[in-house]
Image (spheres, grey):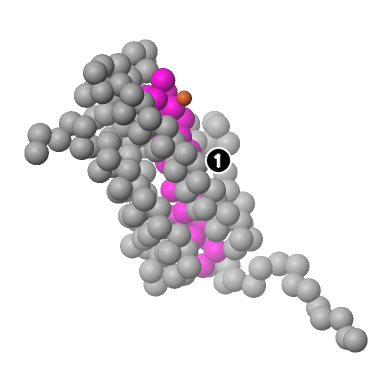
Amino acid sequence: MTQQAVRVQPSFDANVATAVSQLLGTVVTELTALQINGKQAHWHVRGKNFLAVHELFDALVDHAHEWTDLAAERVVALGLPVDARLQTVAAQTQSAKLTAGFVPADQIIREVLAQIDVALAAVTRAVTGLGEIDPASQDVSIEIQRGLEKDRWFIYAHIAEA
Ligand SMILES: [Fe+2]
């Protein structure tokens, strides 16, 4: 039986891989920041909706963790590295600093929504930018967008007036 040659490198176009790594790399950065700040919010929310908001923030962190992995591994599958080191994420994230210490629910919800919106902006840029470049990577972005928009709704509903 003849042995088949095994590819040792992915065969994707280098320009495609670079574009994917730039767009999904930003998604990785912002979702990593969201995991960290989401936990901070989970621990420090106060007020009468404590339990519901506390648990929602934990669900958000869990989802952000899964989506970070999804985006990062798409880049790595195309043969390029990602840089989600602590210092890199801290230097590159566009998200604002959360208020330190215990924070009333309404305020911390608004702060977390702002963090979600920064991540969503990166995800939306990936969805828009990847459609013509790599549909599989766009699909990854769309999955993240759909989930993050759902989490945003669940959290926003606590401060919505109607
Ligand atoms: Fe916890």
Instruction: Say which residue label 1 marks.
Output: 84
- Hey, which residue is sitting farthest bottom in the picture? 1
Whole-percent x, y for residue 83 in the image: 57, 44
Query: Is the magenta region chiefly helix, strand or loop?
Result: helix
Residue 118 in view (yes/no): no
Nearer to the camera, 17 or 41: 41
Whole-percent x, y for residue 71 in the image: 50, 53
- Hey, which residue is sitting farthest left in the picture? 162
Tell me if residue 140 comes above or below residue 12 in the rendering. above
Where does the N terminus fall, quadrant-wise?
A: bottom right
Q: Is residue 38 magenta?
A: yes
Left or right: 66, with 10 as reference point: left
Whole-percent x, y for residue 31 in the image: 44, 41
In the image, the segment drawn in magenta is 16-43
Residue at image coords 36%, 50%: 147
Residue at image coords 36%, 43%: 119
Whole-percent x, y for residue 151 in the image: 32, 43
Nearer to the camera, 24 or 151: 151
Left or right: 155, with 74 as reference point: left
Tell me if residue 127 comes above or below residue 103 in the rendering. below
Residue at image coords 75%, 67%: 8
Where does the C terminus fall, quadrant-wise?
A: top left
Amino acid, disc 1: Ala
